[in-house]
């Protein structure tokens, strides 16, 4: 349970690490849009190549990227199977209610590549950006919302605390599970209903301790002179640099490429 | 005037019956703490020592009486953050004190709250991490560190605020022996080398022995105080308040009971060996 690679941060000084976190977030959002706007293999190829470029530049061992994929392997298989059997057009293979069409195959390939690219890109974002940088960037990007009294700083603080306590709470869950098992709790057998019920003795202590922790954390933050976002400074300043501009230009080229491919060639979906 | 002056403080958590508090967590405590002093406060669980610690940085305010820190009354609201800047409080559970996912970013949290300029924060963070000997771990994730290391990061987080006094509420209670050793030697170094005022709340007697002054508490009151030698030679008094004495002091006390003539109660193993050699002669 503890080696959850997704959402972790690996300190480093690669080009991707040094990009402005705001630029990374904006690029990521644009990326999500374009990956779902690819309608033929050339366009898909361009976005995949762009993903690969970033993964290589991030300088993080492929091992961790594979690990992040392991978590979603089920979703990938499930959705690609669904797409495979629900394609339209003349079937090339049929058995009972299952029928495979060329359109279905294309769809399955696209959905698989899209999900994998999406997970890899989001892993790349969290692997190379510390949670503080990430929430700092979100805080800055959402700053205009302050005008409508939206609690931007508070939300960013909550996010960074939540990210900070993910591993701690996972460890705690592990401990509680062991403790309940030691007292004879059975979590592996029985039907679904029984198993869900077996989770209650884990969730209740977890909740209680999470609240107690929250109280402690609040005390510790107050001891360190925390008094909301007003007047706070940051150790790590974020600036747009030449490398961010280059990254944006690359992304613009990819978007342009996808548009050209989509309009010049016929779509396969 | 002393750096911290606690004047006849009463405090109770809201257990009130017929308009009067059922039990005072702090029940009339007066104590002065001088600049550069290393004070250990000992007492068994629930004796009010943690409550007293929280009074020192205005986390809790006295029901009656006063706490004066460097000339400022803790009950004056405008001074709260000035006081917290001067008196840093380190808590028991190291996990719950670390708020960021990267060591150096956590240490930067305090100065960031104070609105310190970025370059200056960087300098303070590096200095604080070096002071607790954790500089090479600055880019690590705290959850991968040992308990002693985490607690040293928590201390660095307080040091980066540049306080004049650091109060620690049972900082070693959740640590293994090597973690305890790391934390205590860090504190001793800060006290000796940087003349940092240290108030250590603990229930480990071998830690209290290292302090300049030991304060013994029970039921919210100060029972006795003085140098470790004078406090730990009052073996019967300590036992009455459900406290242990260091092993060597206990041995000396028992030998004395057997009629052996011992003038000075030893506090460390070395002193104890010396005492036994003396007695054998």
Image (cartoon, helix red, strand yellow):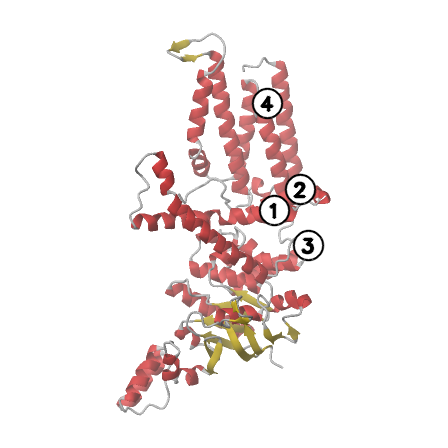
The residue beneath circle 4 is A37
Q: Earlier in the sequence, mark 2 or mark 3?
A: 2
Question: Mark 4, mark 3: which one is toward the viewer?
Answer: 3
Q: Residues within 10 Å of mark 2 (few under 14, many from 20)?
A: some
**Mark 1 or 2 closer to N-term?**
2
The reply to whether callout 2 and callout 3 are in contact (CB within 8 Å) is: no
Percent coordinates x, y for residue B59 in the rendering: 58, 65
Left or right of residue A120: residue A237: right
In the rendered structure, the residue with mark 3 lies on which chain?
A
Asked if residue A203 lies left or right of residue B132, the reply is: left
Question: Considering only order in the chain, which callout, 1 or 4, is on the residue closer to the N terminus?
Answer: 4
**Chain letter of the residue beneath label 2 in the structure image:** A
- The residue at which mark 1 appears reads as A156
Q: Nearer the viewer, residue A125 or B255?
A: B255
Q: Is residue B20 above or below residue A257?
A: below
Image location (x, y in percent) of residue B278: 30, 89
- Label 4 resides on the chain identified as A
What is the C-alpha distance between the residues marked 4 and 3? 41 Å
Please tell me which of labels 3 and 1 falls first in the chain: 1
| Whether label 3 touches label 1, CB < 8 Å | no
Q: Secondary structure at mark 2?
A: loop
Label 4–label 1 contact, CB within 8 A: no
Discs 4 and 1 carry the same chain letter: yes
- The circle on residue A230 is 3
Disc 4 residue crowd, few under 14, some 14–19, many 20+, Cα 10 Å: some
Could you tell me if residue A240 is visible in this image? no
Taking the view exactly as shown, the residue that stands out farthest to the top is A90
Picture disc at residue A142 = 2
Q: CA distance from mark 4 to mark 1?
A: 30 Å
Secondary element type, mark 4:
loop
- Residue lying at 63% horizontally and 68% vertically, measured from the top left: B83
């Amino acid at each position: 349970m503890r080696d959850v690679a997704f959402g972790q941060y690996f300190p480093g000084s690669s080009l991707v690490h040094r990009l402005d976190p705001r630029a990374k977030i904006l690029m990521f959002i644009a990326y999500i849009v374009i990956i779902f706007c690819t309608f033929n293999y050339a366009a898909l190829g361009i976005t995949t190549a762009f993903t690969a470029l970033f993964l290589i530049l991030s300088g993080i061992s492929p091992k961790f990227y594979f690990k992040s994929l392991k978590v979603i392997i089920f979703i990938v298989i499930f959705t690609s199977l669904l797409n495979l059997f629900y394609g339209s057009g003349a079937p090339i293979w049929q058995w009972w209610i299952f029928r495979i069409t060329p359109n279905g195959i294309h769809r399955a390939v696209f959905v698989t590549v899209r999900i994998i690219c999406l997970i890899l890109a989001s892993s790349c974002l969290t692997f190379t950006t510390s949670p503080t940088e990430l929430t700092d960037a979100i805080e800055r990007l959402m700053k205009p919302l302050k005008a409508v009294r939206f609690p931007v700083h508070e939300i960013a603080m909550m996010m960074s605390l939540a990210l900070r306590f993910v591993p701690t709470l996972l460890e705690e869950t592990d401990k509680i599970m062991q403790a309940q098992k030691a007292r004879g709790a059975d979590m592996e057998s029985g039907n679904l209903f029984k198993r869900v019920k077996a989770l209650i003795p884990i969730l209740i202590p977890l909740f209680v301790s999470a609240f107690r922790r929250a109280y402690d954390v609040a005390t510790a933050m107050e001891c360190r002179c925390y008094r909301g976002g007003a007047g706070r400074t940051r150790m790590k300043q974020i600036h747009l640099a030449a490398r961010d501009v280059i990254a944006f230009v690359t992304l613009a080229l990819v978007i342009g490429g996808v548009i050209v491919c989509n309009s010049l060639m016929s779509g396969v979906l | 005037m002393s750096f911290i002056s606690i004047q006849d403080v009463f405090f109770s958590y809201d257990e009130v019956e017929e308009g009067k508090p059922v039990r005072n967590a702090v029940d009339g405590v007066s104590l002065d703490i001088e600049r550069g002093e290393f004070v250990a406060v000992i007492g068994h669980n629930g004796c009010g020592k943690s409550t007293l610690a929280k009074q020192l940085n205005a986390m809790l305010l006295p029901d009656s009486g006063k706490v004066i820190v460097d000339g400022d009354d803790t009950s004056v609201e405008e001074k709260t953050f000035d006081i917290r800047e001067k008196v840093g409080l380190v808590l028991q559970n190291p996990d719950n004190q670390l708020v960021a996912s990267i060591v150096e970013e956590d240490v930067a949290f305090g100065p960031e709250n104070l609105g310190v300029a970025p370059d200056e924060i960087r300098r303070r963070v590096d200095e604080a991490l070096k002071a607790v000997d954790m500089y090479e771990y600055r880019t690590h994730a705290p959850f991968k560190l040992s308990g002693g290391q985490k607690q040293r990061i928590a201390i660095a987080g307080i040091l980066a605020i540049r306080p004049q006094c650091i109060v620690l509420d049972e900082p070693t209670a959740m640590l293994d022996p090597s973690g305890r050793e790391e934390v205590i030697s860090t504190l001793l170094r800060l006290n000796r080398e940087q003349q940092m005022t240290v108030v250590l709340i603990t229930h480990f007697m071998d830690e209290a022995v290292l302090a300049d002054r030991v304060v013994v508490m029970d039921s919210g009151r100060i029972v006795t105080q003085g140098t470790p030698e004078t406090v730990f030679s009052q073996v019967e008094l300590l036992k009455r308040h459900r406290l242990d004495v260091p092993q060597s002091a206990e041995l000396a006390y028992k030998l004395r009971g057997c009629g052996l003539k011992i003038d000075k109660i030893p506090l460390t193993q070395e002193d104890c060996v010396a005492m036994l050699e003396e007695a054998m002669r």
